[in-house]
Image (tube, rainbow, N blue to C red):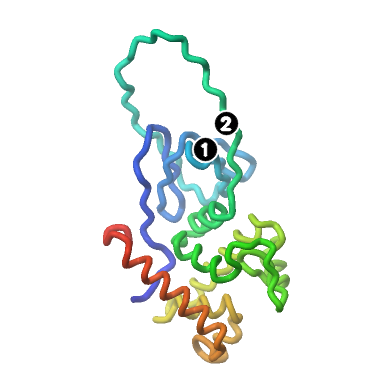
Amino acid sequence: MRHSLLLLLLCAPSAAGEYAVLESGFRLKIDHHERVGSQIRLFTTKDGFMDLPASSVAAIEAEEFVPPEPVAATVPIAAPVAAPPIQPNAKELVRMAAINHGLPPEFLDLVVNAESGYRQDAISSKGAIGMMQLMPQTAAALKADPHDPGQNVEAGTRYLRNLLVQYENYPDQLRRALAAYNAGPGAVQKYNGVPPYRETQLYVEKIVGAYRRTLKQQPADAR
């Protein structure tokens, strides 16, 4: 099966509020939103908040809300105290980056696990840095600080998406993109596909195999 960049992402129903409609087509249930410079801050009950580039948010839709029947209060209720914003952890950074760039979060999770095991302090023998193992020259080209977790994941995801676009007309698009991420586009061009490097071949097959198993475990209407 040929892989495309986007898979259908589903949003589970919850309490009334708003929906953020992303350029990728994903509708994210939120409590409310606000503009912060060039970012749109999306507030959610579960995750606190996340910041996305305004250009990635196509629309904000209000959810129709039917209030419950009023209940007579017998005990004064204290005003709720707002919890401090929850800062994204490593898993959340990866999920947000995947959504922002139109990639399945499950796929990007497998890539980060294969690259670094989610260790931001990981540095390879060749000098690749952080969770997505960015080479310094790649990070510089993407104008990102590879030592910053957020910038590392964002830049690595953007680079991976660009590779998927580059090879979208090939039947082995996914394998070529992963091989190029691991060994460089030059190696893929030289061998017209996954290069005969044992490390790269194991890397590609590990991710592709795990992702196929993930897809088989999903309901048919969620693929």
Q: Which residue is mark 2?
A: 83
How crowded pointer 1 is (Cα within 10 Å; few <14, some 14-19, many 20+) is rated as some
**Quarter of the rendering containing residue 129:** bottom right
The amino acid at mark 1 is Phe
Q: Is residue 67 left or right of residue 136?
A: left
Q: Which residue is mark 1?
A: 43
Q: Are marks 1 and 2 in contact (CB under 8 Å)?
A: no
Determine the residue positioned at 55% across, 41% down: 49
Mark 1: secondary structure: strand
Residue 136 at what x, y percent from top left? 72, 70
Determine the residue positioned at 39% across, 81% down: 171
148 lies above or below 73: below
Residue 151 at what x, y percent from top left? 65, 57
Q: Nearer the viewer, residue 8 or 39?
A: 8
Mark 2: secondary structure: loop
**Quarter of the rendering containing residue 8:** bottom left
